[in-house]
Amino acid sequence: MTTIYFVRHGEAEAGFGAHRDPGLSALGRTQAVTTAKHLAHLDPMPIFSSPLLRAQETAQELANIWDAPITIEDRIAEIPSPIEDLTDRTTWLANVMAGAWHDLPPNLKAWREALIDCVVSAQNDCVMFSHFVAINLLVGAASGDATMVSFRPDNASITRFESDGSTLTVLGLGEQAQTKVN
């Protein structure tokens, strides 16, 4: 069995509808340090990050403690938006999050399947730094919940999964909060 520590990035400097790839806010950097200290007691293991800056900056704190590299993993990025206009992206995301994954267009269903496959096929215990929607889709896949949002992981929270190479199990949900998607 493989354990995957799936971490939501710290608070971003800007939201989904305000910036395409923001870094962490001051609070987000503090959250990243706190989460890294929480994970530091574990034996060092591979660290993967979404290619988005806020996830990479969150991962960097743990990488510094473990003196370990970060591998960028495109499959754990946030849901790809087909909308270029930043204001319209917020509306698009709100509509998507209110639905179910089976209502997604084919390209987003393929993104979801690649995300699940990435986590299920992890060969070694690892830490993955990712995003709100991605975490929710994994929890839904593990529990059979088709909704896009089954819980609200707080920034820099840790959701633990276990995989046997073919199925995914939730070992523990991360801290929840009334957060905005950023």
Image (cartoon, rainbow, N blue to C red):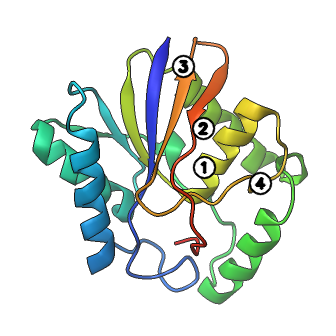
Is 96 in front, or is 105?
Answer: 96
Give the CA separation, mark 4 to mark 2: 14 Å
Q: Residue at x 51, y 80 (%)?
A: 15
Q: Determine whether 127 is above or below 120 in the image.
A: below
Report which residue position mark 2 lands on.
115
For disc 2, the neighbor class at 10 Å (few under 14, some 14 to 19, many from 20) is many
Residue for badge 1: 134
Local crowd size for mark 1, using a 10 Å CA cut-off: few (<14), some (14–19), many (≥20): many
- Residue 148's tag is 4
Q: Earlier in the sequence, mark 4 or mark 1?
A: 1
Q: Are marks 2 and 1 in contact (CB under 8 Å)?
A: yes
* Amino acid type indicated by mark 1: Ala
Residue 39 percent across, percent down from the top left: 28, 40
Q: Are marks 4 and 2 in contact (CB under 8 Å)?
A: no
Q: CA distance from mark 3 to mark 1?
A: 16 Å
Q: Residue visible at 66% across and 49% down?
A: 136
Q: Secondary structure at mark 2?
A: helix
Q: Give, as a three-letter code, the residue at label 4.
A: Met
Residue 160 appears left or right of 46: right
